[in-house]
Image (cartoon, rainbow, N blue to C red):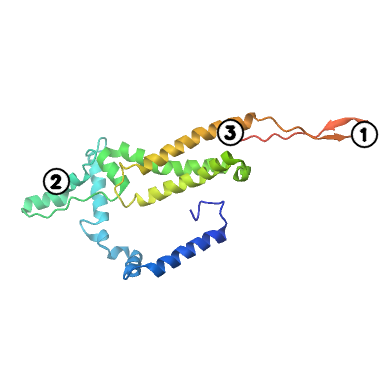
Amino acid sequence: MFVMVRTVSLDKKLAVVGLLGLGLFLSAPEGYLQKMETILHPTQDYNYDSQSGRVEIWKRGIRYMFGHPLTGIGIDNFQRAEGTIADIAVEAHEEMYTGVRWNAAHNTLVQVGAELGIPGFLLMFILMYRGIYEMYRVRKRLPKHWIEGDAEERFLYQASVFLPVAMVGFGTSGLLVSHAYIEPVYVIAALQAGFYNVLEKKLRQTSRAPAPDAPARRVRGGHVAAHPVFVPTVER
């Protein structure tokens, strides 16, 4: 929101970020800030070097995808694969010891790629990230007077701002959680599709709107001539 929302002034954005940061600093429980400092040292976290950490899980998930490139290992089978066909699971079975963790993918794209194969991975990637670019492209081509236009124009302009912000939110957090089959990404995509449909109708109406009457002006000889009328065209 700080980067993409252009209708809010920079000083207001800085004020909001400052208040949020101050509130977090004052209300953080004991040990929270020290935990947050570990972000600066990612290689010292178990997610980096543990067999059950995210990096190793993602590597195995990619191997599942390329091992079954067209169909994947099946919907909702990632954790089963971790406990049965993963290299650590096979080793555990051979050594006759227990304790293999049936890990979740902890990454929406890795989850979809492993469970649905490369086609599923590409479709999810497009669903999550293509809409961000398309909405940004559409917004740049909208008439600027819509920012302060009627209720419908203001709503459509703001929708072109905040729908991609919502998808950025899901696309970012989705890289650390297994949310391939929950509603948010599909709801946001549906709202974007509805936005395109409504926007197309609105632009057609705008392009067919009659131009305002031009004021008359007098020229030499008493003749009356009209000022030239400029009819703006709206790109679609």
- Precedes in sequence: disc 1 or disc 3: 3
Kindly check if marks 2 and 1 are in contact, taking CB atoms under 8 A apart as contact.
no
Inter-mark Cα distance, 2 to 3: 55 Å
Kind of residue indicated by mark 1: Arg
State which mark lies toward you, 1 or 3. Answer: 3
- Precedes in sequence: disc 2 or disc 1: 2
Q: Left of 81 or right of it: where is 170?
A: right
Residues 3 and 224: in front is 224
Please report the residue visible at 46 percent of the width from the left and 48 percent of the height from the top: 165
Q: Secondary structure at mark 2?
A: helix
Query: Eyeballing the image, is 53 above or below 62?
Result: below
Residues 107 and 150: in front is 150
Kind of residue indicated by mark 3: Leu
Inter-mark Cα distance, 1 to 3: 41 Å
Query: Eyeballing the image, is 179 above or below 193?
Result: below
Residue 135, image x, y percentages: 49, 42
Q: Left of 66 or right of it: where is 3?
A: right
Kind of residue indicated by mark 2: Thr
- Label annotation for residue 84: 2
Residue 141, image x, y percentages: 58, 40
Q: Does any portion of residue 125 appear in the rendered image?
A: no
Q: Secondary structure at mark 1?
A: helix
The residue that mark 3 highlights is 203
Inter-mark Cα distance, 2 to 1: 94 Å
- Precedes in sequence: disc 2 or disc 3: 2
Q: Secondary structure at mark 3?
A: helix
Q: Is the residue marked by circle 2 packed among few (<14), some (14-19), or many (20+) residues within 10 Å?
A: some
The residue that mark 1 highlights is 220
Q: How many numbered callouts? A: 3
Residue 164, image x, y percentages: 46, 45
Kindly check if marks 1 and 3 are in contact, taking CB atoms under 8 A apart as contact.
no
Kindly check if marks 2 and 3 are in contact, taking CB atoms under 8 A apart as contact.
no
